[in-house]
Amino acid sequence: MMVQRSILVTGGAGFVGSNLAVLFKTKHPEVKVVALDNLKRRGAELNLLRLAKAGVRFVHGDVRNREDLDLKADGFIPDTIIECSAEPSVTAGYNTSPEYLINTNLGGTVNCLELARATGAQMIFLSTSRVYPIERLNALAFTEDVSRFKLSERQSVAGACANGVSELFPMDGPRSMYGATKLSSEHLIEEYRAAYGVQSVVNRCGVIAGPWQMGKVDQGVFVHWMASHYYKRDLAYFGYNGSGKQVRDLLHIEDLYSLVEWQVEHLDRVNGAVFNVGGGTECSLSLAETTRLCTELTGNKVSVRPIEEESVADVRIYISDTSVVRTRTGWAPKKTSRDILRDIFTWINKNDAALRQVLAP
């Protein structure tokens, strides 16, 4: 049994937040769990029934508004804040104003930190691998085989090898507006830890995937790929000669939960740590490999046309080197890439009527 806790999950109706909230309440019924979300992202409303069934209290609020986070009048004072709120698209702010992105991803973090300072709560921050500079990632040495690009063992910069990118990777250079807001949040978290004693840990996550992710091409690509096969929609390989060989590691949401659960109970052991969190080389896929698996699982073959023009902020290869988090916590992901895609397929198939309007508009 977990020590009696009161957990606030921001972005609590989103993919990551809702799954973490439901899993915490399901596995630890004694824990008070509140999920706060502004329901801006389409499909988030589908998670409200799941939250209610699990016994998670939902609060319709916005991290941009500090008063929305103050729930003490309702008798709820968190001792743990799991900060999952974000505008998650890596392309956000490129062709439109970045105001919402900045106010949510950075301003929201400030408001969560102020709540932690006032209440003494510990904070677990869901950051992103997108804090690493795009040009530096694309300059890494690589080889090419029939289905994917692979990182070379020997690299000219620290923090990179065939196992992926570690926390020592150089941080100079642009990284997208999304990545910049997350990195800025990381810096503020460290300052609040030093100045006010806010215990915290930062998880720089690679691609997280699994059921209840309303995937799009710019965020949630593996759900997007599976849904496109399920609903027989055409796809495209952008950039890199239209080969579909660009690679990401992926992490099942339940594997992320197992790490966050450990951190909630043992944060004092990793206070101030920054971890790269992902599936690593063992759980990684290229788009071409994903197409093959999706075809196999759905029985549907869709047209995938090559487009040489590269997507905004795309990188050739990103794989998380998870050596540090494994050593410090004993955690390791258990789900394979096939497990993840199969779980996504099963979820779509089971909830077709509700999901069709979101995943196949």
Image (spheres, rainbow, N blue to C red):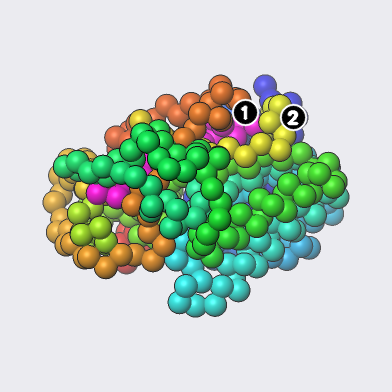
Among the 4 quarters of the image, the one containing residue 33: top right
Residue 92 percent across, percent down from the top left: 49, 68
Residue 344 vertical position relative to residue 259 in the rendered view, above or below = below
Q: Quadrant of the N terminus?
A: top right
Query: In the figure, is residue 88 to the left or right of 61?
Result: left
Would you say the residues marked 2 and 1 are in contact, meaning their CB atoms lie under 8 Å apart? no
Task: Look at discs 2 and 1 and give the one toward the viewer.
Answer: 2
Identify the residue at horizontal 57%, vertical 49% (top origin).
Answer: 127
Checking the image for residue 262, the label placed there is 1
Measure the C-alpha gap from mark 2 to mark 1.
11 Å
Magenta-drawn stretch contains 345? no
Residue 65 percent across, percent down from the top left: 73, 66
Q: Quadrant of the C terminus?
A: bottom left
* Residue kind at label 2, given as amino acid type: Asp
Magenta-drawn stretch contains 246? yes
Q: Secondary structure at mark 2?
A: helix
Residue 217 percent across, percent down from the top left: 35, 60
Comes first in the chain, label 2 or label 1? 1
Report the residue marked by disc 2.
Answer: 268
Pick whichever, 286 or 209, lies toward us.
286
Crowding at mark 2 (Cα within 10 Å: few <14, some 14-19, many 20+): few
Q: Secondary structure at mark 1?
A: helix
Q: Residue furthest bottom?
A: 96
What is the magenta range?
245-263
Query: In the figure, is residue 310 to the left or right of 27?
Result: left
Query: Visible in this render: residue 140?
Result: yes
Crowding at mark 1 (Cα within 10 Å: few <14, some 14-19, many 20+): few
Checking the image for residue 155, the label placed there is none
Q: Residue furthest front?
A: 156
Identify the residue at horizontal 41%, vertical 62% (top origin).
Answer: 313
Identify the residue at horizontal 72%, vertical 53% (top origin).
Answer: 188
Identify the residue at horizontal 58%, vertical 41% (top origin).
Answer: 203
